[in-house]
Image: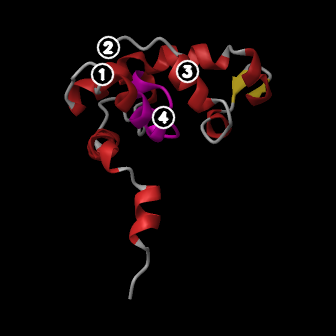
Amino acid sequence: MQFFTEEALQSLLKVEKVHKYAYGYEVLRQLGIIRKSKSPTDDRYHTKKYGQSLRYGQYGVVAACINHGIKASKSEADSINNILSQWIAFEKWAAGQESNKSYKNGSAFSYINYYKGSTVNEYLKSYPFTS
């Protein structure tokens, strides 16, 4: 039984980007390990240290790591540590953007909806993460 034709597969997966797929897979795998690790303060999703990155923003972290870690020739672990150390600042910046005002309810910001929304990808690309 054949699920995909070779042409269909090539349109989905670009061979020249296979290194990004592998890098992203390893980042996501390592984020899962971090997420499952015990927090000394019983903070299940490590929100005090990493904001909502491990709860709602895992794919955003993967995208940021691919965009910035590969360019800087960083290992997946170094890239994760670098991006996660900046994540709370990113979320604060993103929450303050005019186009994200629909995610605000009073002084609260709905991260669950933000990470499913239409602006997250644009902001991940435009936020000045340092390498």
> In the rendered structure, which amino acid carries the disc numbered 3?
Glu
> In the rendered structure, which amino acid carries the disc numbered 4?
Gly
> In the rendered structure, which amino acid carries the disc numbered 1?
Lys
Q: Which residue is mark 3?
A: 91
Mark 2, other Cα within 10 Å: few <14 / some 14–19 / many ≥20? some
Label 3 to label 1, Cα distance in Å? 22 Å
Mark 3, other Cα within 10 Å: few <14 / some 14–19 / many ≥20? many
- Quadrant in which the C terminus appears: top left
Q: What residue is at 80 percent from the left and 22 percent from the top?
A: 106
Q: Which residue is mark 2?
A: 131
Q: Nearer the viewer, residue 21 or 116?
A: 21
Looking at the image, residue 42 lies above or below residue 88: below
Of the image marks 2 and 4, the number of the one nearer the N terminus:
4
For marks 4 and 1, give the one nearer the viewer: 1
Using the rendered view, name the quadrant where residue 96 is placed. top right
Instruction: Tell me where residue 53 appears, x and y as whole percent.
Output: 46, 32
Q: Which residue is mark 4?
A: 60
Q: Are marks 4 and 1 in contact (CB under 8 Å)?
A: no
Q: Which residue is mark 1?
A: 71
For marks 3 and 1, give the one nearer the viewer: 1
State the extent of the magenta-drawn residues as a range: 49-64
